[in-house]
Image (spheres, rainbow, N blue to C red):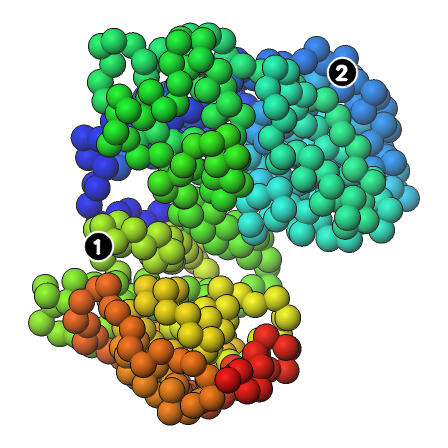
């Protein structure tokens, strides 16, 4: 996997909440600690919840001979669920029959959790597991991604080994997952796999002890762990406000958007919402699936020009960025450009994985994509363009100098690099690079009926870089111009009712 350009966490003390556990179900805490140490940090765990195994009898009704035959799938949302289910699997008989008429069966898990779904596990489900059982790892390692990967249920049953929650409010993750399955046409059956509960009154001791050293950051990996910490603080006579007052420089980070929303619901402000893990794991999960195909010829990965263009121009004598250029990790971290950082690490991880596994991987790096929208629900970039046309300056100011490309050219570039045998490596895909003031000046002339601002601030100071797209153009691609891409975008916004014909 790609390594950062420097150890930006070197010497930092990082607390992270984690479950107490007696098995490998809580292994992600250990993995997080390892990753932090690799970045030079001094991590320390704060176990605020506990994972308690059920007696195997709780799962036994689903593990009798042939008991899983009425089900089409087995879906795990946690490593602890897989560990509990594996522990309960009997050795004397198999819950899936191997009759010739038996239907295919899917076992699904998220990201690295699927490592536990090895041959030994599958052999304890079904004698003919190699023929009947398929392992599904969604590209997006979230419960919602799992629902999407399972597809339409059409009334089929799916067994979901999930936790009981004791003494804590149940986070919305599992209820939302089950509701998502039902909405997709599955008959979801909840099976009690283990219990999640509070770790006890001493769980916050590492943060409130009189001699405790100041943590530079605290990382929350689930909302249940946050509630456990708040209960631990209360038991110790503390509060979150008092803890923040004691450590005013402590950064609060959340692992992904689901956890971040849960943390905010508990009244805690999140400073950093992690995006790197899902970006890297999702990319690698796709490549792992590609690796299994004996017919695979080439993989085309969509990255972003954000993996190239974030550079300190005062340190660069040459301001023409090409495919050999990578965005500066220290600068991305300094400016808190987490999207760009995620694209850098995900693309480097993909290139490393492809090299190690002899996969012919080509990456396309589009700039800001402009053009018509297929969906009535606007993506972030289309929404920001709409705001600019309506006179909103706040969101677009953050972009600074930016490359722009028509969505048709992005689609054509993917087909081109896929079908051209000599295509190799990275390909920047951008028609033009403009300062934000150059852009609004062009748009104000092109669309005088809209209240487009005449000037925008640039929070990054003077910028002059250009993107060298000669490599892609050398394959025969000719880019559409900036007027055409924005005209197509505006017409699409009008057709979908987002933009009035004459707003004045």
Which tag, 1 or 2, sits closer to the chain's start?
Answer: 2
Residue at the location (35% across, 88% down)?
Answer: 442
Above or below, 121 against 497 in this view is above
| Residue 322 place in picture, x, y as percent | 26, 74
* Relative depth, front residue between 429 and 99: 429
- Residue 248 locus on image (x, y percent): 25, 29
In this image, 40 relative to 278: left or right? left
Residue appearing at x 50%, y 19% in the figure: 228
Query: Which residue of the protein is positioned furthest toward the right in this rendering?
Result: 101
Q: Which residue is mark 2?
A: 58
How would you rate the neighbour count of disc 2 (Cα within 10 Å): few for under 14, some for 14-19, many for 20 or more? few
Q: Which is nearer the eye, 235 or 304?
A: 235
Residue shown at 46% from the left, 71% from the top:
387
**Residue 443 image-quadrant placement:** bottom left
Q: Is residue 361 above or below residue 356?
A: below
The part of the image, by quadrant, that contains residue 317 is: bottom left
Image disc number at residue 331? 1
Residue 75, can we see it? no
Does residue 150 appear in the picture of this structure? yes
Left or right: 63 in relation to 375: right
Q: Nearer the viewer, residue 154 or 358?
A: 154
Query: 10 Å neighbourhood of mark 1: few (<14), some, or many (≥20)?
Result: some
Residue 402 in the image: state x and y as whole percent: 31, 73
Locate residue 41, reporting x and y percent: 25, 31
């Amino acid at each position: 996997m790609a390594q950062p350009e420097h150890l930006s966490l070197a010497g930092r003390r990082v607390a992270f909440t984690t479950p107490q556990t007696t098995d490998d179900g809580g292994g992600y805490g250990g993995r997080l600690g390892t990753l932090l140490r690799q970045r030079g940090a001094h991590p320390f765990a704060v176990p605020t919840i506990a994972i308690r195994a059920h007696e195997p009898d709780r799962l036994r009704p689903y593990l009798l001979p042939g008991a899983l035959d009425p089900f089409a799938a087995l879906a795990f949302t946690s490593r602890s669920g897989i560990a509990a289910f594996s522990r309960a699997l009997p050795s004397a008989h198999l819950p899936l029959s191997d009759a010739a008429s038996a239907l295919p069966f899917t076992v699904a898990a998220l990201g690295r959790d699927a490592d536990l779904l090895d041959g030994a596990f599958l052999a304890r489900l079904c004698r003919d597991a190699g023929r009947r059982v398929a392992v599904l790892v969604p590209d997006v390692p979230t419960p919602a991604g799992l629902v999407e990967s399972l597809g339409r249920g059409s009334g089929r049953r799916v067994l979901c080994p999930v936790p009981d929650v004791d003494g804590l409010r149940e986070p919305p993750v599992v209820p939302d997952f089950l509701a998502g399955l039902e909405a997709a046409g599955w008959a979801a059956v909840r099976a009690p796999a283990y219990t999640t509960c509070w770790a006890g009154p001493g769980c916050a001791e590492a943060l409130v002890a009189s001699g405790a050293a100041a943590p530079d950051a605290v990382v929350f990996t689930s909302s249940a762990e946050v509630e456990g910490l708040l209960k631990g603080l209360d038991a110790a006579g503390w509060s979150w406000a008092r803890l923040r007052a004691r450590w005013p420089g402590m950064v609060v980070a959340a692992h992904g958007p689901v956890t971040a929303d849960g943390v905010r619901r508990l009244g805690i402000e999140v400073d950093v919402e992690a995006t790197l893990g899902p970006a890297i794991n999702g990319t690698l999960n796709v490549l792992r699936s590609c690796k299994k195909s004996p017919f695979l010829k080439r993989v085309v990965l969509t990255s972003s020009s954000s993996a190239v263009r974030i550079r300190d121009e005062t340190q660069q004598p040459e301001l023409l960025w090409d495919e050999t250029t990578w965005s500066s990790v220290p600068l991305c971290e300094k400016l808190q450009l987490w999207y760009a950082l995620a694209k850098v690490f995900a693309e480097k991880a993909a290139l490393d994985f492809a090299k190690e596994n002899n996969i012919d991987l080509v990456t396309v790096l589009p700039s800001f994509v402009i053009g018509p929208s297929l969906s009535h629900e606007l993506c972030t970039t289309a929404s920001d363009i709409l705001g600019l046309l309506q006179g909103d300056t706040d969101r677009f100011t953050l972009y600074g100098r930016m490359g722009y490309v028509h969505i048709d050219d992005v689609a054509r570039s993917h087909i081109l690099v896929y079908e051209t045998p000599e295509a190799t490596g990275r390909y920047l895909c951008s028609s033009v690079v403009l300062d934000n003031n150059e852009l609004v000046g062009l748009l104000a002339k092109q669309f005088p009926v809209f209240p487009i601002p005449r000037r925008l601030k640039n929070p990054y100071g003077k910028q002059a870089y250009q993107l060298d797209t000669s490599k892609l153009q050398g394959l025969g691609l000719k880019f559409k111009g900036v007027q055409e891409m924005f005209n197509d975008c505006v017409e699409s916004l009008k057709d979908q009712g987002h933009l009035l014909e004459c707003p004045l």
